[in-house]
Image (spheres, helix red, strand yellow):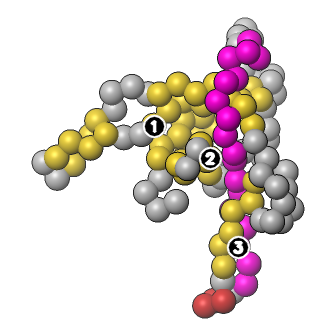
Amino acid sequence: MRYKMHISELRTIIRIQRKVVTGTGIHQTISWIDLGNTLSTDPPRYLRCKWFPLGGSEAWIAQSVQVIDAANVILRYNPLITASCRLIRGNIVYTIMGPMDPDQHREWTAFKVKASLNG
């Protein structure tokens, strides 16, 4: 059974970046480059996705309530999207959790994201 979604549902604009580590030891630097780009100075690559919040996610941590900014994301299939990538929506950086091809037809990629505290 094919995963059904219409292209008009891809309304949210995002960027997906991969981590690039250069140098070693104390000279090691980490940079984030948009998927499809070669250098961090290349222009941003925007993608469209279907974005829907997980809704009402709250966690009791240290006797306080903290709202978790998390969502489900669906976009066109891209085998380069892995859990080591990150997603940027507006000015918020999200951690990607478990990207998958839901119907195994290489048409869509689906995953959950959670707002990252350290960017």
Q: Which residue is pictured at 33% across the width and 27% down the height?
A: 56
Residue type for callout 2: Leu
Secondary structure, mark 1, is strand
Q: Which residue is pictured at 21% across the width and 42% down the height?
A: 65
Dividing the image into 4 quarters, which one contains the N terminus?
top right
Is residue 98 visible in the rendered image? The answer is: yes
Question: Residue 68: x and y, percent?
Answer: 36, 40
Is residue 101 visible in the rendered image? The answer is: no
Relative to residue 11, is residue 117 depicted above or below?
below
- Give the crowd class for mark 3: few <14, some 14-19, many >=20 residues within 10 Å: few
The mark closer to the camera, 2 or 3, is 2
- Give the crowd class for mark 2: few <14, some 14-19, many >=20 residues within 10 Å: many
Question: Residue 101: x and y, percent?
Answer: 71, 29
Residue type for callout 1: Ala
Numbered tag placed on residue 56 in the rendering = none
Q: Which of 118 and 100 is in front in this view?
A: 118
Asked if the residue under mark 3 is in contact with the one under mark 2, i.e. CB atoms within 8 Å, the reply is no
Numbered tag placed on residue 87 in the rendering = 2
The residues tagged by marks 2 and 1 sit, at their Cα atoms, a distance apart of 12 Å
Residue type for callout 3: Val
Q: Which residue is pictured at 58% across the width and 44% down the height?
A: 90
The residue labelled by disc 1 is 70
Q: Which residue is pictured at 53% across the width and 40% down the height?
A: 113
The residues tagged by marks 3 and 1 sit, at their Cα atoms, a distance apart of 27 Å
Range shown magenta = 6-23
